[in-house]
Amino acid sequence: MAVVALLSVAPVREGSMASEVAKAVAALDAFDVAYETNPMGTVIEADDVGTLFDACEAAHRAVDGDRVSTFLKIDDKRTREQRAREKVESVERELGRAAKKDRE
């Protein structure tokens, strides 16, 4: 089974959060997960939900601050295995093009 999630972890504070977000992303390296960071969060793939939760907890704990905000959205498709890239490819097939557009 593949579990796909969107994780966003950040300290609640003014100014750049990049250094703390980098700590959260780096914490994922200790787990058997695949991930890709984008401007709004990090998409994570794991073979099971336990591994996913452990990785997300580590990312949350890696961020320093008096207050840390974590958003986690999980897609645990149990009827068949589907990777994150396949989900994007399905949308791209329907669009007939890449699901990306840069501003001109």
Image (cartoon, rainbow, N blue to C red):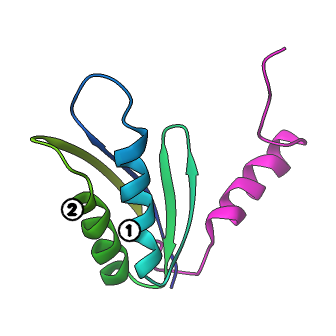
In this picture, is 23 found above or below 97? below
- Range covered by the magenta-colored residues: 77-104
**Residue in front for this viewpoint, 101 or 61:** 61
Q: Residue at x 63, y 71 (%)?
A: 83
Q: Which disc number belongs to residue 61?
A: 2
In this picture, is 55 found above or below 91? below
Quadrant assignment, res 56 = bottom left
Query: Could you tell me the amino acid type at mark 2?
Result: Arg
Residue 85 part of the magenta segment: yes
Q: Position of residue 17 (x, y in %)?
A: 36, 36
Quadrant assignment, res 96 = top right
Q: Position of residue 34 (x, y in %)?
A: 56, 73
Please report contact status of discs 2 and 1: CB closer than 8 Å, yes or no.
yes
Which residue matches tag 1?
27
Query: Could you tell me the amino acid type at mark 1?
Result: Ala
Q: Residues within 10 Å of mark 1 (few under 14, many from 20)?
A: some
Q: Residue at x 70, y 54 (%)?
A: 88
Q: Residues within 10 Å of mark 2 (few under 14, many from 20)?
A: some
